[in-house]
Structures are given as structure tokens and as C-alpha cells.
Image (cartoon, rainbow, N blue to C red):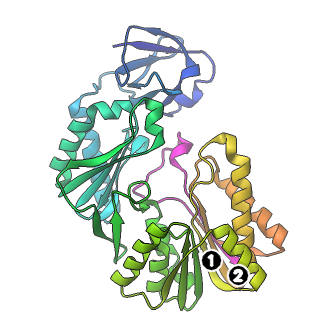
Amino acid sequence: MAKLFLKKVNIDRILNGHPWVFDNEISSVEGAYTAGDIVEVYDFKKKFIGRGFISPKSKIRVRLLTRNKDEQIDNYFFERRINEAWEYRKKIVNTSSCRVIFGEADGLPGLIVDKFGDYLVLQSLTIGIEKFKAAIVDMLVNILKPRGIYERDDVPIRELEDMPQQVGYLYGNFDTLQQFEENGLRFWVDMKNGQKTGYFLDQKENRMAIKPFVKDSNVLDCFCDTGSFSIHAASFGAKSVRGVDISPQVLEIARKNAELNNLSESCSFEEANVFDLLKNYDEEGVKYDVIILDPPAFTKSSKTVKSAYRGYKEINLRAMKLINPGGFLITSSCSQHINPNEFLSIIVDAAKDTRKKLRMVEFRGQAKDHPVLPASRETNYLKFAIFEVR
């Protein structure tokens, strides 16, 4: 097993529990390795730090799996970690739909597994996980007893690990359009063509949190995707809900979700660019009682944070101008490169420019099946806030 030795500087992050070792933090290597092999990491004093996957093509050179020198990385290790992750979910959430494995937060860097009813969707994002993928699929079948597992590895991040993008069946042969339950409502998930794994489970608890604010209100749901917030708002007694997204494919599913829950009369959906729509509504004097903003990540790199800041500010600013006094802005950001304080600063800046008075009613993060590692801010990525606007 190859050994990597770290430089003397900038190792506090790793010693404090962060699982990533970057290429520029390594001073020397002893022994040979191939991509995805298990290697040992030591500090500059040759003190053992941990053991993990190595990826020669990635700036994240090593992803640590264990800091216990006596713990070996083998099939039993992965089976134990998967069992631990599943037992955790069974304790804290309704597992009819949930994230079963959340990568680093479950001690399995690069592995994502989402559960939709009787089916699982898997993402293998690191070459180390890829080497164990067949065994991991067998373990998931034995532990969770799904009817099928689908692979959604059509993500560019795999190319950074010198792996091809691919999708397909890993276990079973089934219709990739399936129904599942969330918060007592029914939804369709398109495991083959939907975004990421087909549906955003991280907002599950936040969708419940909007209940007191939408009753008897006219609601605009921006970046609505397959209509999850819209359907929840309508089920909570909103007078009307207008969902907006630029993708006709997701809106087709959104309409099916409204039909599935007998909410088509109160839910309608429109294909439009949200930035343009909000601008047009402002010019036309259109008003809403509640506006929900759940945009995609406007930045996936620290290099584009400034442009993302402008994008987040613009949509929040325009939304504030459309909200009736005493109404509510429900807004979020899923970009890990925008921290909670920065996100709140964006909202405050937008309120200043619109001369609106805000009162923050609630500030939340991702659902409990997406646990956070305090030592790794990347795992604490979702910001969700509810403001009264006057």
C-alpha cells in the first residue's frame, strides 16, 4: 500500500476531520499505486492520519475513508458503512423516500444513493467507489431489498476522475418512471431523464415548513422543476399556485403530479425564463402573496461566486417587488460556494435596493437524511429562508 506524506503547512483542515487531501498538500509518495487504490496518508512527522482512495487525475488527490489504522478497506467495510447509513435513516426519517447514502457525510466519498419507493438511484462519482460498485450494488440489494437500481452517472464530475458518463440498469429491469410518496403526497420520479437522481429529496422537510405561510394565498413557485413545492402549497390550502420553469419536460411531470394528487384546479404551470418573467410581472404590476424561489446552483466553482451573487440578488430583488405587503418570500440556494452568511447578505442587499422591510421567520438547511459533517462545509450546502416582506 502506497504511503503519502503531507506538507507541514495547511494540514489543520485535514487533522480536524475534513476527508479531502488536495494534490498541492502532498510533499512525497512512497510506493506505487493505480487510480482508485487504497493509500495511507501521514503527516510531515510520519504520523498516521488515515486511509482512503487515491485519484491521480483529480485535484482532490485522496478521499479519506477511515482514520483507524486497524480498519481495513474491503467489502466488509462497505457493508458496515451502508448498514450504518440505512439504520440512521430508519431512525430519523420516513424511508419510503429518502437519501440512503450521502457521500462523505456517510463515510463513503463519492457515493450517492436515493430511494424512491421500491427503487434506488445510484451515483458513483469517484474512481474508488467505481471499483467497488458491483459489490456495493449487491450489498444494497441484500440490505434494502429494492425492486430495482438505476445508475445516473451522467455527470461531468466523473470525467475529472477519468471515468465516462453513463446511465443504465444496475439491478432489475423496470419502468424508470415511478411513483413514490413524500409527506403524504404522491409524486412521479423520472429516474432516467430527471435532474440529478430524478427528484430533489433535500428539500423534503422544507416543503413541509411552508404550510403556515401559503394557506389562502396566491403563490408563485419559481424554478418549480417537477412541481414539488407547488403541489405541497396547493395541498396546504393555497388559493392558487403558479409554477414556472424553463424546461417543458419537467413541467409535463409537474402537471402529472398535480393530477396525481387531485390538485389540477388550483395548480397551473408555465414554461418561461424566471428572470424574464419576474421582470415582466413587475412591469405589469402583477402581485402575489407568496413567492417561492428554488433555483439551481448559480455557481459550481469559487471562481464564479461574484456572478452567482448577482443572479441570486436579482431574482430575490424582483420577487420582493411582486409580494403584497405582509406576504412571504420563501427563498433558497443549493450552491456550496455561497455560505449561509453570504446568502443572507444577498437578501439584505436586495431588500435595501427595493426599500422593503424584511423579517426572517425561519432559516433552515437540508433534510436530516442529508447529514452535515461540521469539519466539511461542502456537506452543508442548502440554505432555505422564509421572510415576511413589507
Q: Is residue 374 left or right of residue 100?
A: right
- The mark tally for this picture is 2
Query: Front-most of 335 and 390?
Result: 335
Pointer 1: what residue? 291
Q: Residues in magenta? A: 364-390
Disc 2 to disc 1: CB gap under 8 Å: yes
Q: Is residue 66 visible?
A: yes
Residue 73: x %, y % from top left: 28, 27
Callout 2, which amino acid?
Answer: Ile
Residue located at (28% from left, 67% from top): 178
Residue at x 24% of width, y 59% of height: 119
Q: Position of residue 328 (x, y in %)?
A: 65, 79
Q: Which mark is residue 323?
A: 2
* Cα–Cα span, label 2 and label 1: 7 Å
Does dot 1 land on a helix, a strand or a loop? strand
On screen, residue 84 versus residue 9, left or right, reads: left
**Quadrant of the image for the N terminus?**
top left
Query: Is residue 276 placed above or below 212 in the rendered structure?
Result: above
Q: Earlier in the sequence, mark 2 or mark 1?
A: 1
Residue type at the position of mark 1:
Ile
Q: Is residue 296 above or below residue 158?
A: below
Q: Residue at x 47, y 39 (%)?
A: 157
The spot of residue 211 in percent (x, y) is: 50, 80
Q: In screen coordinates, is 280 left or right of 333?
A: right
Secondary element at tag 2: strand
